[in-house]
Image (tube, rainbow, N blue to C red):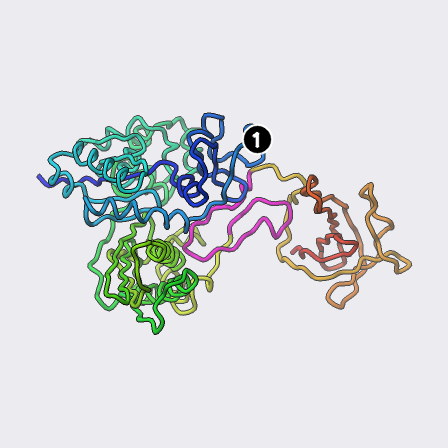
Amino acid sequence: MKDSRLLTVWCPDWPVVAACTATNTAPSVPVAVLDGNEIVSTSAVARKEGIRRSMRKRAAEAMCPELVTFEHDPQRDARFFEPVAEAVEELAPGIEVVQPGLVAVPAQGPVGYFGSAEQAAERLVDHIATRTGAEAQIGVAESLFAATKAAHRNVIVPPQSTAEFLKPLGVHELDAPELVDLLRRLGLKTLGAFAEVPESAVASRFGGPAVRQHRLARGLPERPLDKRRPAPELAAAETFDEPIARIDAAAFAARHLAERLHENLAARSLACTKLGILARTETDEELHRVWRAAEPLTPRGIADRVRWQLDGWLTRERLTSGIRTLTLEPVEVVNGTALQLGLWGHDDERAVRALLHVQGLLGPDAVLTPVIDGGRGPKEQVRLVPWGDEKTPSRNPDHPWPGRLSRAPATLADDPAQLEDEAGRDVGVTGRLELTAKPKTLTVRGRTREITAWAGPWPVDERWWAPDPHRAARVQVQTSDQAFLLIRRDQRWFLEGVYD
């Protein structure tokens, strides 16, 4: 019987490993990697000091003053992971890089060659350690999600036992925080309990995204992929007059080719879930790598993976010449509607095709969607991301934001304004957060309006500990026809927004 399981190789704490390797930081030092001000990865030494993921930088440094921190850099992670991927491929050809620190390969090949999954795992771990010095763990299961969770536990799941392996795991293993919180409140605390809920009930109660998570909990692929054999003309290739030997040139080539590939796919309403990157050097050395994605790749997702891979190849010591030809080929494609639109609560096929076409013609930044972000001011609370990219807040909107407006204006602006009293003098804000006079008129965009009501001021006091703290104050004013939000900074008034 054919072994349908996947074998995953996982290197624990890879962002930390890559950062320490790049900076020659000693392994005995507590280290954390930050995305913004939030910890996304920690070393084992840091965890012994109580440092955990999702902690804020300030809290972590208060708990462990000797903590060394690095900014999250996916390109650095990919660059230092390339030797590990090469080491795995030497024993298990046909690997797919899921992300820096994690690769997957069909288990049938290495299991059949080495005699058993246990022997394959042992050989792979020893080979990676010998070639690169990196620590690795192996997982084997019948879906990428389950195989990844198995690798985190260094477990080999027998055939047809994936659902049993997942059953006792907590729902927090799902990468869907809102759904996890809801499931816990409903009393569904394990993946097994969630899996027992009928799929039709999950679809009707929670919608399509929850159905995909439900499939993961049952040990099935995230979605029943409508896999197709890509047509040869879908690939995007380019031969460079000057061979690529620098990272900045590689980044430009990656973006240009990603847009071409996406345009080719969008014209047929397709999206890529496995991306093949093929490069040929001046000396005819051929390099090839496949990247696997859980979600269909957006233009930016394609460009990022190409850039990371080229960075890994160009910084290798044994690459003796620049890259002459670069080819991107969609190894696996699905229907373009697999990209979630999320504008009207359901996917509209015509809208999906139209937006894919616009992005294909004008680039990924031509279609943007809003993400609710954390912050105090109205501009900070909304961030635009390319349509199809992950809509993840850069700052948690649920965290306390002292001074945050309860109702943001519908239209944002940043225009100079004049707020004057009855005598035509500028209205300021005192140190006690009071207006220096009763506001009478507002002048903005060349038009003067008489104020009928006003509220505030409210303080904006940020980075009070820094040498250059940010201090400002906001006021809402009402005229006969509109309401406005003003902010006072550097002794001047500015229009921040207009209310409907």
- Other-residue count near label 1 (Cα within 10 Å), few / some / many at <14 / 14–19 / ≥20: few
Q: Position of residue 372 (x, y in %)?
A: 53, 48
Specify whether residue 356 is in view: no
Residue on which disc 1 sits: 65
Residue 358 higher or lower than 402, as above or below: below
Start-end of magenta stretch? 371-398
Relative to 178, 89 lies left or right = left
Residue shown at the point (73%, 54%) measured from the top left:
486
Asked if the stretch drawn in magenta spans residue 385, the answer is yes
Asked which secondary structure carries label 1, the reply is loop
Compared with 475, 320 (above or below) is: below
Residues 274 and 99: in front is 99
Residue found at x 28% / y 34%: 137
Q: Give residue 310's quadrant in the image.
A: bottom left
The kind of residue tagged 1 is Pro
Judge whether 141 appears above or below 337 on screen: above
Q: Is residue 72 magenta?
A: no
**Magenta region, mostly helix, strand or loop?**
loop
For the C terminus, the quadrant is bottom right
